[in-house]
């Protein structure tokens, strides 16, 4: 056994999963240490359940390799893997009582009655349900049923417990209580937990390590503190906690410009005059009465009492900032804002414009995204040649009426950038189109997509 096998209980190497044309997971690499509590976090449809099902063996990988406890298990059937799964829906047998539900798998393994009894009692104790063994499962609350489901999974003494949104069906109070219990259980059991959720707060509360996913890809792997304080990109910053995410320009090392103002920052190595994303958490912005100390001056647009702090929006020029503070200001107050250099987080932009692969049809027509578009006369390539097509985010027009667009798609992700929205739209051609707009759209909206001829830049490949 080499060092790596000893260190990691789960090793996922270059794993992809395709459902027909659909890529659910793309080249996933992840190593999980023994005893770690790892949470796979992401919005609906990002591929987290698929990844868990590949670990459980309910689905097989299309490409790549999975090793658990040092063994290559890509083709191993579920019951032969050292894992057990707890699902969102408790999946208990309604005609069996608590004891028999937990004992079910052990009876199939033909263990002796005494051993079964010892193991069932042990796992009931572990989930705090000692006195419930002869209760009908139907008579239990949702939280208690989920505890029984966990007891049934851990009674097999798996090396890895897979949990697929196990608390999603519980009400808020029960969910909070169960989060604490799960954390305790993880400590007591000492086994590895791989936990799937779309709830960022749950991920921050429970995990040693968080794996943030979107669109079938891993965006960042890190501790809750790393992910919160140093998000790798604007998607992670937006998904984890509240953020102000703005377009900025890195003027030089330690100096960034946004909102028409220069700010000192601690980041270096971005080059000069480089477009960047700037992320500032709302709790990192100081708000006070207008004074010379302010870096920005703005007017309060809204204010909500949140129990411990106030949450206010402040309009500075045409940028809107979300601010959280113990001090309260009224709507209409003119205020000063200040942010310390170390609280300004600078990120590389993932892209500066849309880039599509296309084919020049004739001097004034180019094919991309599965459609033919009129373009301004092209001289850099010959008809029939493959070309690259660039379109700025703010040049793409979205329409309510799908039929008005040259092609159609669905809004997948919306990022508010202080003075506009940055949308990710999945076209029905299955390519992503990025759009800057002032119009308000919702996740899941169907849209028509129009790209004017003058917005299309044809570039020779
Ligand atoms: P949710 O939180 O909504 O369950 P998720 O992040 O767990 O979302 P997955 O269920 O893993 O996402 O799905 C990832 C993508 O793969 C989705 O676009 C989904 O429609 C697709 N997908 C999943 N299972 C199948 C399947 N059996 N056949 C076709 N497509 C599938």
Image (tube, rainbow, N blue to C red):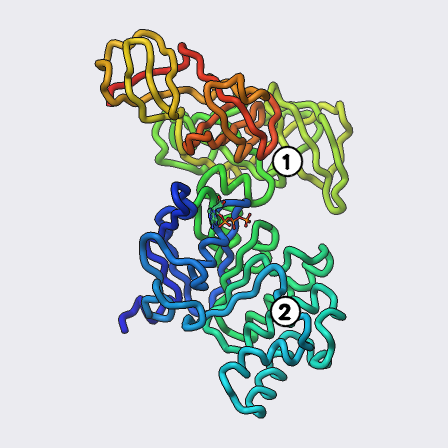
- For residue 305, what is the image quadrant? top right
User: Residue at 74% of width from left, 46% of height from top?
Assistant: 308
| Total residue callouts | 2
Q: Nearer the viewer, residue 330 or 289?
A: 330
Q: Nearer the viewer, residue 70 or 345?
A: 70
To which residue does mark 2 refer?
92
User: Residue at 51% of width from left, 74% of height from top?
Assistant: 190
- Residue 390: x and y in percent read 36, 21
Question: Which quarter of the rendered picture does the C terminus lie within?
Answer: top left
Is residue 199 placed above or below 82 in the rendered structure? above
Tag shown at residue 286: 1
- The first of marks 1 and 2 along the sequence is 2
Q: Nearer the viewer, residue 202 or 460?
A: 460
Q: Secondary structure at mark 2?
A: loop
Q: Nearer the viewer, residue 293 or 237?
A: 237
Q: Is residue 417 left or right of residue 372?
A: right
- Residue 85: x and y in percent read 52, 66
Q: Residues within 10 Å of mark 1 (few under 14, many from 20)?
A: some
How far apart marks 1 and 2 lie (CA) works out to 51 Å
Q: Is residue 87 left or right of residue 139?
A: left
- Residue 456: x and y in percent read 38, 15
Q: Which residue is situated farthest in the top direction here?
A: 377
Question: Which quarter of the rendered picture does the N terminus lie within?
Answer: bottom left
Q: Secondary structure at mark 1?
A: strand
User: Residue at 43% of width from left, 58% of height from top?
Assistant: 59
Q: Is residue 173 left or right of residue 235?
A: right
User: Residue at 71% of width from left, 28% of height from top?
Assistant: 289
């Amino acid at each position: 056994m080499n060092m790596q096998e000893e260190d990691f209980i789960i090793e996922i190497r270059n794993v992809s999963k395709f459902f027909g044309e659909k890529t659910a997971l793309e080249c996933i690499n992840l190593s999980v240490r023994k005893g770690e509590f790892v949470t796979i976090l992401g919005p609906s449809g990002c591929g987290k359940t698929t990844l868990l099902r590949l670990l459980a063996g309910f689905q097989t990988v299309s490409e790549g390799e999975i090793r658990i406890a040092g063994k290559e298990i890509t083709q191993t059937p579920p019951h032969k893997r050292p894992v057990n799964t707890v699902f969102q829906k408790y999946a208990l047998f309604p005609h069996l009582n608590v004891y028999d539900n937990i004992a079910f798998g052990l009876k199939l393994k033909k263990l002796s009655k005494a051993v079964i009894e010892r193991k069932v009692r042990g796992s009931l104790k572990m989930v705090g349900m000692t006195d419930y063994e002869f209760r009908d499962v139907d008579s239990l609350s949702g939280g208690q049923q989920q505890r029984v489901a966990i007891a049934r999974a851990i009674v097999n003494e798996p090396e890895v417990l897979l949990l697929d949104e196990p608390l999603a069906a519980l009400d808020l109070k029960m969910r909070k209580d169960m989060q604490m219990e799960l954390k305790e259980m993880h400590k007591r059991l000492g086994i590895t937990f791989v936990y799937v959720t779309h709830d960022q707060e749950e991920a921050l509360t429970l995990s040693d390590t968080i794996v943030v996913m979107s669109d079938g890809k891993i965006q960042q792997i890190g501790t809750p503190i790393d992910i919160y304080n140093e998000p790798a990109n604007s998607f992670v910053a937006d998904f984890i906690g509240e953020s102000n995410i703005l377009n900025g320009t890195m003027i030089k090392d330690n100096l960034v410009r946004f909102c028409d103002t220069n700010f000192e920052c601690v980041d270096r190595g971005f080059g000069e005059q480089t477009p960047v994303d700037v992320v500032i958490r709302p709790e990192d912005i100081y708000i006070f009465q207008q004074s010379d100390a302010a870096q920005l001056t703005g007017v309060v647009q809204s204010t909500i009492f949140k129990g411990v702090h106030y949450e206010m929006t402040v309009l500075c020029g045409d940028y809107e900032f979300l601010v959280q503070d113990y001090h309260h200001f009224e709507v209409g107050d003119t205020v000063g804002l200040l942010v310390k250099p170390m609280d300004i987080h600078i990120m590389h932009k993932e892209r500066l414009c849309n880039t599509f692969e296309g084919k020049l049809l004739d001097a004034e027509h180019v094919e991309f995204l599965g459609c033919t578009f009129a373009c301004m006369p092209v001289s850099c390539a010959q008809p029939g040649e493959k070309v690259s097509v660039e379109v700025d985010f703010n040049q793409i027009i979205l329409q309510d009426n799908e039929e008005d667009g040259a092609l159609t798609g669905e809004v997948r992700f919306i990022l508010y950038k202080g003075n506009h929205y940055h949308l990710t739209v999945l076209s029905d051609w299955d390519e992503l189109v990025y759009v800057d707009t002032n119009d308000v759209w919702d996740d899941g909206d169907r849209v028509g997509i129009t790209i004017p001829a003058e917005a299309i830049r044809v570039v020779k490949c």
